Every structure is written in structure tokens, then in C-alpha cells.
């Protein structure tokens, strides 16, 4: 796994889009945004005790596997554009790359895009309420495990979706630094704060 701040280019979304010079983002910085990461052995995912332990500790009871190949997936380009729409979920998004490569882009507390490059063996959790998007890289192929707590809910809410309480909760936890307050408007109030005012 590698992460960096993205450039503003409108070129193909499958390109790396690194700044010049590159601005890397550390795992510690991702964790401050609520992103968690594990490196596992994807060759033994069916029997991997480490994966089983993670699933048990976090309650990831549901699992399925999806394959996204350019050659055989109908309407591939249209679906890739759909995945690339900026959105959030009301639940965590957990993905484990079993083969191929992919990118997750997330917004930081200053609303800048961070690109997370994922390879075989990378498992990531994006927190509920974070704005993000997904795309493949130039290889146009990935095979991934989708994990979920309980029954899966695949509903995505395209930006703007700031009215959701889960978004407000994410913002209150992750955008309370002085840097955020000096650059952006204050974090949105929760429903209870609005009712009290």
C-alpha cells in the first residue's frame, strides 16, 4: 500500500496522478482520518488465521468476492465512471485485494484528495462518512473480497451528503484541528447541536 496527495489533472483516472514533487501520505496520517490497513497473504485467504482473527475482532460476518476485468465485464468503462463518483456510505467499507491492483481516493480534513494504491494482499477499512471514490489502475483488473458487518448494504450517497449524521460524526472526530478551522468553515453541527441552538 502506498498513498499520496493527488494532482488536479483531468487525465485518465487510472493514472497515478502524483504531484511533482510527490507528497506521500503515511499510514499514521491515514489512521487519523479513520482509515485502517493490514497486509495479509492473499494466496491463503481461504484458510488464513490472521484474516479470520481480523474478521472475528471486527465483526466482519459477511464476505463475498468480486472480479473486475476489462475484457469480460459488460459496460466496463461506464461502471468504472460510476465507481469514480465521489460518495460516502453509512457503514464502513472494507476491501481486501486478492489479485490485481486498485485505487481508493479519500478526502482529507482540508478536502484534498489522497490516493491510496492497493496491491495484492492489502486490506483496508474506510470509515463510514468519509467521502471517497474507487478506480482501477492501468492494468484494468482487480479481484477483491468485500467484507461487511451483518447484512451488506451497498447504498452509496453521492456528494453533497453532509446532512447525514454519520458524516457529521466523521467530521467532528477528524476535522477538529486548528489547521482545519483556519482553512475551512467549522465542522458541521450535529443534529442535537442544531436542536439546542
Image: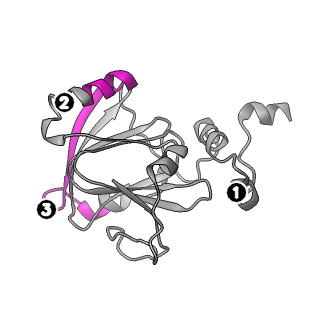
Q: SS for tag 3?
A: loop
Q: Tag 3 or tag 2, which sits nearer the N-term?
A: 2
> Picture coordinates of residue 142 (x, y %)?
21, 53
> Residue 171 lies in what quarter of the image?
top right
Q: CA distance from mark 1 to mark 2?
A: 41 Å
Residue carrying label 2: 48
| Count of numbered labels shown in the rendering | 3
Going by the image, does 172 lie left or right of 158? right
**Mark 2, other Cα within 10 Å: few <14 / some 14–19 / many ≥20:** few
Going by the image, does 91 lie left or right of 196? left
Residue 164 vs residue 92, the one in the foreground? 92
Q: SS for tag 1?
A: helix
Image: magenta residue range: 51-78
Residue carrying label 1: 179
Q: CA distance from mark 2 to mark 3?
A: 30 Å
Please, is residue 15 above or below residue 147 in the view? below
Q: Residue at x 37, y 22 (%)?
A: 57
**Mark 1, other Cα within 10 Å: few <14 / some 14–19 / many ≥20:** few
Disc 3 versus disc 1: nearer the observer: 1
Q: Residue at x 51, y 51 (%)?
A: 29
Please, is residue 151 above or below residue 173 in the view? above
Q: SS for tag 2?
A: loop
> Picture coordinates of residue 100 (x, y %)?
20, 55
> Picture coordinates of residue 86 (x, y %)?
48, 56
Q: Residue at x 25, y 56 (%)?
A: 101
Residue carrying label 3: 71
Amino acid at each position: 500500500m502506498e498513498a499520496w496527495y493527488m494532482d488536479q489533472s483531468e487525465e485518465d483516472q487510472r493514472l497515478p496522478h502524483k504531484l511533482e514533487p510527490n507528497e506521500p501520505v503515511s499510514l499514521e496520517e491515514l489512521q487519523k482520518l479513520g482509515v485502517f490497513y493490514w497486509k495479509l497473504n492473499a494466496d491463503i485467504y481461504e484458510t488464513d488465521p490472521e484474516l479470520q482473527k481480523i474478521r472475528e475482532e471486527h465483526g466482519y460476518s459477511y464476505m463475498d468476492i468480486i472480479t473486475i476485468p476489462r475484457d469480460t465485464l459488460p459496460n466496463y468503462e461506464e461502471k468504472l465512471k460510476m465507481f469514480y463518483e465521489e460518495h460516502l456510505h453509512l457503514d464502513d467499507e472494507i476491501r481486501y485485494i486478492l489479485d490485481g491492483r486498485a485505487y481508493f481516493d479519500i478526502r482529507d480534513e482540508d478536502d484534498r484528495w489522497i490516493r491510496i494504491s492497493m496491491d495484492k494482499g492489502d486490506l483496508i477499512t474506510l470509515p463510514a462518512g468519509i467521502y471517497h471514490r474507487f478506480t482501477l489502475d492501468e492494468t484494468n483488473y482487480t479481484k477483491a473480497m468485500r467484507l461487511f458487518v451483518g447484512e451488506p448494504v451497498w447504498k452509496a450517497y453521492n456528494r453533497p451528503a453532509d446532512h447525514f449524521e454519520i458524516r457529521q460524526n466523521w467530521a467532528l472526530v477528524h476535522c477538529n484541528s486548528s489547521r482545519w478551522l483556519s482553512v475551512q468553515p467549522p465542522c458541521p453541527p450535529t443534529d442535537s447541536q442544531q436542536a439546542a441552538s
